[in-house]
Image (tube, rainbow, N blue to C red):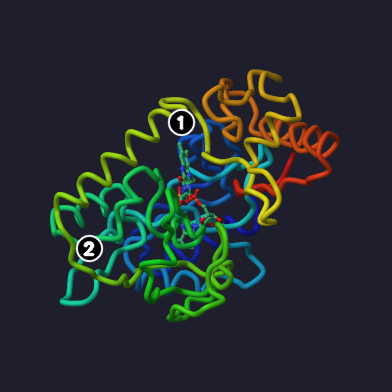
C-alpha cells in the first residue's frame, strides 16, 4: 500500500472526514471521452470546511488536482498521482441578490442558464450549450457565439491547495482566450456574477438560436471533449478547424479515434481501451497541420496524469 494512501486513510479516520474517498479510482466516467486512467485518491468533499481541513492536513508534497465535469479533460492511462478533487452536490447553490448572482462551482452551465432565463436575467444565454459546470467554465473562460465568462464574472471565492480562502476579483488581466491566469492552483468554490435584468422572450430566443446552431455545427451524442485545439490568436491566421481541413487530416482514423465530420476540431473517441491513443491521435493532427501550414496548434483540452 502506498505511503500517500496510508496518510490519507489516517487523515480521514482521525478527523471524521465524511466526503467520498476512493483509492485507485477509475476516472473514465468522469471524462467525456469515456476512457481515462485512475485517480490514485479520489475525494469529493462533504462541505467547504471539511475540504479546507483536509487540504491543511494533507502534506504539501502530495499532488492535488481539481476536476469539474470532465468535458474538457483527457486523463492519460497512467492516471493522476495524489488526490483528485471533485466538488459535488454540496457546492451547487444558486442565490440571487439585487445586483448579483452567486453560483456554486458544481452548478451545471446549462442549469444556470435555464435558471437565469426563468428569472429574466440576461448574459448567461451562451452557457446553455456548454456541457461543463460553472467552476470549470470560470477556470477555462468558457465561451461561445461572441460571449464568454469574462463578460459576466465579478469575483470568485476559492481555496488554495493549502486550504486557505482567497477571493479573486475581476481584473483586466484575469481572463484571456480559454484561459484564467489566476486559478491554476486554486479550487474555485463559488462565483459572483453580474445580474442584469432582461427581456425573457429575447433571452429565450437567444438560447434557442444557440442550441439550434450547435446541433447544426457540432457532433451530438458522441464521446468528445469539445474543441481540441485553441484557435490561433493572430488576426491573420485561420481557425483551428480550417487549418485541420487544409492539412488533409479530416478523414484520418487511428485505433478508433477520429475527427468529427461536422467539426474538424472535435476529436471523436470510439474505443474504451486507451486515453493515450486519443493524445497520440491529437499529436498526429498537430504535426500534420504544422507540416502543411507552419502553425503549431495549442491544445485547448486539458491533459492530466502520467502516460504510463
Ligand atoms: C460537446 C462539447 C461542446 C463544448 N463546447 C464548448 C464551447 O462552446 N465553449 C467552450 O468554452 N467550451 C466548450 N466545451 C469544453 C468544456 O465544456 C468547457 O471548457 C467547460 O467549461 C469545462 O468545464 P468542466 O466542468 O467540464 O471542467 P473539466 O473539463 O473537468 O476541467 C477543465 C479545467 O477546469 C479546471 N477546473 C474544473 N473545475 C474547477 C474548479 N472548481 N476550480 C478550479 N479549476 C477547475 C480543471 O482543473 C481543468 O483544468 C465543449 C465540450 C464538449 C464536450
Q: Residue at x 86, y 36 (%)?
A: 291
Residue 180 in which image quadrant: bottom right
Closer to the camera, 172 or 186?
172
Q: Secondary structure at mark 2?
A: strand
> Disc 1 marks which residue?
217
Q: Which mark is residue 196?
A: none
> Disc 2 marks which residue?
94
Label 1 crowd (10 A; few <14 / some 14-19 / many >=20) = few
Indicate whether 219 appears above or below 235. Answer: above
Q: Residue at x 50, y 39 (%)?
A: 31
Closer to the camera, 129 or 83?
129
Does residue 188 appear to the left or right of 300 in the view shown?
A: left
Closer to the camera, 169 or 212?
212
Q: Secondary structure at mark 1?
A: helix
N-term-proximal mark, 2 vs 1: 2
Q: How many marks?
A: 2
Amino acid at each position: 500500500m502506498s505511503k500517500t494512501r496510508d496518510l490519507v486513510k489516517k487523515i480521514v479516520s482521525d478527523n471524521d472526514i465524511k466526503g467520498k474517498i476512493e483509492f485507485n479510482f477509475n476516472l473514465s466516467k468522469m471524462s467525456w471521452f469515456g476512457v481515462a486512467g485512475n485517480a490514485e485518491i479520489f475525494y469529493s468533499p462533504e462541505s467547504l470546511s471539511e475540504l479546507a481541513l483536509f487540504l491543511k492536513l494533507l502534506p504539501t508534497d502530495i499532488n492535488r488536482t481539481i476536476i469539474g465535469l470532465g468535458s474538457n479533460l483527457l486523463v492519460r492511462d497512467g492516471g493522476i498521482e495524489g488526490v483528485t478533487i471533485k466538488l459535488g452536490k454540496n457546492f451547487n447553490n444558486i442565490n440571487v441578490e439585487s445586483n448579483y448572482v452567486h453560483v456554486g462551482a458544481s452548478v451545471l452551465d446549462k442549469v444556470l442558464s435555464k435558471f437565469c432565463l426563468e428569472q429574466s436575467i440576461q448574459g448567461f444565454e451562451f452557457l446553455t450549450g456548454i456541457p461543463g459546470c460553472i467552476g470549470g467554465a470560470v477556470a477555462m473562460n468558457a465561451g461561445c457565439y461572441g460571449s464568454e465568462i469574462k463578460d459576466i464574472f465579478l469575483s470568485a471565492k476559492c481555496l488554495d491547495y493549502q486550504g486557505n480562502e482567497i477571493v479573486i476579483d475581476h481584473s483586466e488581466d484575469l481572463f484571456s482566450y480559454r484561459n484564467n491566469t489566476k486559478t491554476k492552483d486554486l479550487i474555485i468554490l463559488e462565483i459572483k456574477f453580474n445580474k442584469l435584468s432582461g427581456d425573457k422572450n429575447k433571452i429565450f430566443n437567444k438560447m434557442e438560436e444557440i442550441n439550434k446552431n450547435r446541433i447544426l455545427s457540432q457532433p451530438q451524442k458522441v464521446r468528445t471533449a469539445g474543441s481540441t485545439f485553441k484557435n490561433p490568436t493572430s488576426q491573420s491566421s485561420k481557425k483551428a478547424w480550417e487549418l485541420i481541413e487544409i492539412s488533409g487530416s479530416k478523414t484520418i482514423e487511428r485505433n478508433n479515434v477520429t475527427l468529427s465530420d461536422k467539426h474538424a476540431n472535435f476529436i471523436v473517441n470510439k474505443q474504451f481501451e486507451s486515453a493515450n491513443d486519443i493524445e497520440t491521435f491529437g499529436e498526429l493532427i498537430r504535426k500534420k497541420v504544422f507540416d502543411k501550414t507552419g502553425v503549431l496548434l495549442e491544445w485547448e483540452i486539458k491533459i492530466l496524469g502520467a502516460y504510463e
